[in-house]
Image (cartoon, rainbow, N blue to C red):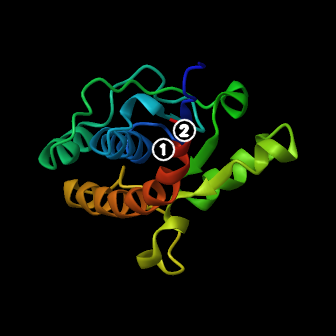
Amino acid sequence: MSAPETFRIVFVCTGNICRSPMAEIVFRNLADAAGLGTRVRSTSSGTGDWHVGERADERTIRALAARGYDGSAHRARQFSLADFEGNDLIVALDRSHERILREWAPTESDADKIVLLRGFDPAAGDQLDVPDPYYAGPEMFDEVLGMIESASRSLFRQLEPAIRLTA
């Protein structure tokens, strides 16, 4: 009997200290709550290298903690070409990340793995970008986290049957 496959998903923003860590942690919590935590590997990265090795922004950690999530262990990393092969789905937090990732994709098959997070949220309408809260106040981090939670729930609902099937 072979071991069940792990679904591998990476969330990508600019510096990997605000939006993508939120999405990584929210998605991991959804998988854990559904009893699929061992079947899902949720990670995150940034298109840039400015914050590699740093913790998530303190406002990110506080916004997460206020809703019961733990972001204290996060350390920023930059997206690499190996992430195309190492993940089943690559989730961009806004269209600029999506464009960069598509430019970096070595193959058409790799480009096909790239999606926009808010594209899964019916409430998003045509507002598909998760705004960058970095230059805003703490209230924007809470607002962004709400967008990420809503879109992540929709994404997880779509993926859950396939993840269960391969368990």
Residue 13 in sight in this render: no
Q: Under tag 1, what secondary structure?
A: helix
Residue placed at 33% from the left, 46% from the top? 30
Q: CA distance from mark 2 to mark 1?
A: 19 Å
Q: Nearer the viewer, residue 38 or 148?
A: 38
Tell me the crowding category of disc 1: few under 14, some 14 to 19, or many 20 or more residues within 10 angstroms, Cα based.
few
> Is 80 on the left or on the right of 166, as rendered?
right
Residue 96 occupies which quadrant of the picture?
bottom right
Residue 145 in sight in this render: yes
Judged by depth in the image, the label closer to the viewer, 2 or 1, is 1
Tell me the crowding category of disc 2: few under 14, some 14 to 19, or many 20 or more residues within 10 angstroms, Cα based.
many
**Where residue 95 sits in the image (x, y, percent)?**
62, 61
> Is 84 on the left or on the right of 89, as rendered?
right
Instruction: Tell me, for residue 164, which label it has, or none.
Output: 1
Residue placed at 37% from the left, 44% from the top? 18
Residue wearing tag 2: 10
Is residue 77 shown above or below 94?
Answer: above
Amino acid at circle 2: Val
**Where residue 38 sits in the image (x, y, percent)?**
40, 28
